[in-house]
Image (spheres, rainbow, N blue to C red):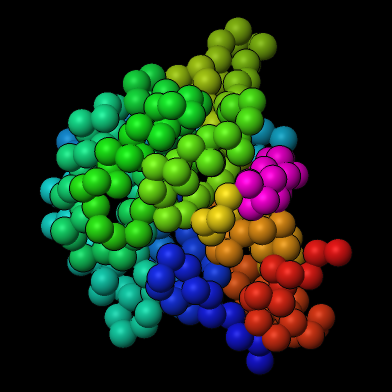
Amino acid sequence: MPDLRVAFCGLEFQNPVITASGTFSAKGSSTFYDFSKLGAVTTKGVAIEPWLGNPTPRIAEVSSGMLNAIGLENPGANRFIAEEIPLIRKGIGISDTKIIVNLAGRSEDDYIRVAELLNTADVDMLELNISCPNIKEGGILFGVSPVLAEKVTKLVRKVVTKPLIVKLTPNVTDICEIARAVESAGADALSLINTLAGMRIDVKKRCHILGNKVGGLSGPAVLPVAIRMVFQVAAAVKIPIIGMGGIMTGEDAAEFLMAGASVVAVGTTALVDPTAPLRILDELREFMEEYDFADIEAVKSALQ
């Protein structure tokens, strides 16, 4: 059997397959599969105060993917700590699955406050979301500017002791420039990519399909873009990468690993097939067995 363990930011993941933020909840996901078998679970974005999110409709299917404009609706950090974390811990049980909390904010102060609070919670890592295209303030405002991305990362780094991941947007001219900026500010790892900004119009009703007009495109349509960006960023920085964007199969996961990712996150496909994270983990293991890969490092170094 191949060894799927991964060393990531000073922690050992039992395998490299995790959930992407916005597509996992302890109560909902545990209905379909045993998430304690994954390397880690990443929560939906959590802000210091509750957010209502965007007007409906919020989700629309498109060719080879979906558009979403949820707007990071969440119950706020205090309720999340009191209700969601215990449920995740119960689902993890005695396994070594890690908990990654995605942090949302509209301002530097928002990010600092929620980071301080979650840093003391029973979680393993924090993921700073500076890349959501579906909110008008904060989020992507910080992610498209190397100066602002570096500044907010540095401010959050000062108040957290847990490993800090920064989630990057693909909606920039040079993602490597942003990656280097947050690395210099103290990020321990990177997540990429978040969704591509997109829009659809219902020509018969003569209206926007999404209530927010603009949404984030995800799913298999974005996979080639994500692979390219992971490959470029892996060559530009020294910190590890969580690769994501359109992963549907175990071979897709292997492709991200060969491109330079250390860990892969499954998102949109779990909304189509709720058991997808475990299925993809099984398919990755089968791929490694078929092609005689002894461990994840062997997959990562396989690209000619």
- Image quarter hosting the N terminus: bottom right
Please tell me in which quadrant of the rendered image residue 207 appears: top right
Do we see residue 134 in this rendering? no
- On screen, residue 179 above or below 201: below
Q: Position of residue 64 (x, y in %)?
A: 71, 41
Q: Position of residue 158 (x, y in %)?
A: 24, 46
Left or right of 61, for residue 10: left
User: In front: 251, or 24?
Assistant: 251
- Image quarter hosting the C terminus: bottom right
Q: Which residues are magenta?
A: 219-236
Do we see residue 301 in this rendering? yes
Q: Residue at x 71, y 40 (%)?
A: 225
Q: Residue at x 48, y 29 (%)?
A: 146
Q: Position of residue 229 (x, y in %)?
A: 67, 43
User: In front: 287, or 119?
Assistant: 119
The residue furthest top is: 206
- On screen, residue 175 above or below 167: above
Residue 277 counted in the magenta span: no
Residue 225 counted in the magenta span: yes
Left or right of 78, for residue 185: right
Q: Position of residue 96 (x, y in %)?
A: 37, 79
